[in-house]
Structure formats: structure tokens, C-alpha cells
Image (spheres, rainbow, N blue to C red):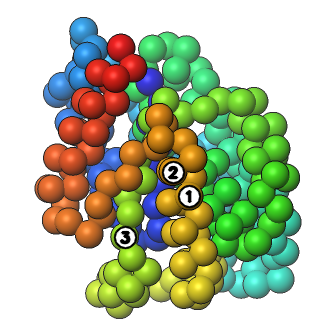
Amino acid sequence: MFITFEGLDFCGKTTQAQRLVEKLSLNSLPGDDRIRPVQLIREPGGTAISERLREILLDRRNLELSDVAELLLFSASRAQLVEQTIRPALGRGEVVLCDRYYDSTTAYQGYGRGLELSSVRLINRFATSGLVPDITLLVDITVDEIDRRKQKSGVVFDRMENSGRAFYERVRNGYLEMAHLEPDRFAVVNGMAPIEAVGDEIWRVLTAIRRRKQ
């Protein structure tokens, strides 16, 4: 089972992915007959090569990085991750949770940066050899909430997080459009709710999707 978490920066998806790992260490997936090993992977990253590419992509000093170069670096990181980590884990029957996957590229580089969507999707398919998540959980928050959480966190923003409000509005709208176009794969979860409530909603969503697909 391949489950991905998507959403805007500071939406809480990383926290929810970690919480789901903890839950799946004690409980089987809804409809499964046993507890399976679980891997949590982040994007970009997850392999030695991918982590080095992550450093380039998020480094605030790399302001000259072009939109197309950004797209290709994210895709290169993902290609290595799929080949080296995700496919082998799925082949062993493990549950793989990925904190971002190619939908992030479509949302951020396609809708956000304005690159041609058909080209972005073609590169996504090529980089992943067509590996599509079984379930994608979109943790949705408003752009106003991003600003509030950024200020509260007090962290130094990386290169991507400094992209501006209009950019994030385009990214959010892109995510919601993708969820509308692929309702069998996407589930939109209200990330504005308390952490525990978001986690409960994710479990209900997983249960409903698994039952529907059985």
C-alpha cells in the first residue's frame, strides 16, 4: 500500500504522517489481515542522493535557480527515491507513507510557478516509471493559516517557503483542482482542525477508501 501526504507548507501533513506511522505500528490497515512494516519517507529526500538534491532545492542562497531546473531537480530526487526505496519496499509488502510525491510538483511547479501542466505531468510519469499512489491525503489549510503558523513557528524560511502569498494561493487552488479531477485517489482533510481531530479524520478516510476498493 502506497499512501502519500500532500498540502501547503505548514499544513501539518508531516505531523499526521508520523502519527499514522505510530497507529499502523499497532493496528493493521482497515481491511488488512495483519500489521505490516511501515516506512515513512520525505520528499525531496529519502536517499543519500536525494538528500543532496534537497539541500540545493531548499537553500535560500540559490535564488538564481530557474523554474525548469527546479522541476527537474525535484524529479531527479524522486526518480532515485522510487527506484532505490519505494518500489523495493512495496515489493516486500510494506506500507509506504510518503511526505510529498509528484502531486507536489504538479501543484508547486505547475500551478504555482506556471509551468505547462502537460509537460509537468509527463515528467512526473517518466521520473516515477508510472508509480501512482493508492491513496493521497490532502491536508488542506488556507493561505492565511500558513502566515499565522509561520509567525508562530519562528523558524527561518527555506527558498520554497519564501515564494509569496499569490504563489501559495495558486498552489492551493491547484491541489483542490487535482483532488476534484481524481476523487478515487485523493481525499481532502480539513487541516484547520486540532491535530487529534485531523488524525481521526484521516483514519476514517482510509477506512472508507479501503472498503470502497475491496
Res 120 seen here: yes
Q: Which residue is mark 3?
A: 141
Across and down, in percent, residue 46 comes to 57, 45
How packed mark 1 is, by other alpha carbons closer than 10 Å (few <14, some 14-19, many 20 or more), is: few
Res 154 seen here: no
Residue 192 located left or right of residue 113? left
Q: Is residue 113 above or below residue 197?
A: below
The nearer-to-camera label among 1 and 3 is: 1
Q: What residue lies at 57% left-to-right and 47% top-to-bottom?
A: 181
Q: Which residue is mark 2?
A: 180
Q: Quadrant of residue 150?
A: bottom left
Q: Earlier in the sequence, mark 3 or mark 2?
A: 3
Q: Which residue is mark 1?
A: 177
Q: Quadrant of residue 54?
A: bottom right
Q: What residue lies at 54% left-to-right and 42% top-to-bottom?
A: 182
Q: What residue lies at 45% left-to-right and 14% top-to-bottom?
A: 93
Quarter of the image that includes the N terminus: top left
Looking at the rendered structure, the secondary structure element under dot 2 is helix
Quarter of the image that includes the C terminus: top left
Q: Quadrant of residue 154?
A: bottom left
Which amino acid, mark 2?
His
The alpha-carbon separation of the residues under discs 3 and 2 comes to 16 Å
Depth check: 199 or 155 in front? 199
The alpha-carbon separation of the residues under discs 1 and 2 comes to 5 Å
Residue 123 located left or right of residue 58? right
How packed mark 2 is, by other alpha carbons closer than 10 Å (few <14, some 14-19, many 20 or more), is: some
Residues marked 1 and 2 touching at CB (< 8 Å): yes
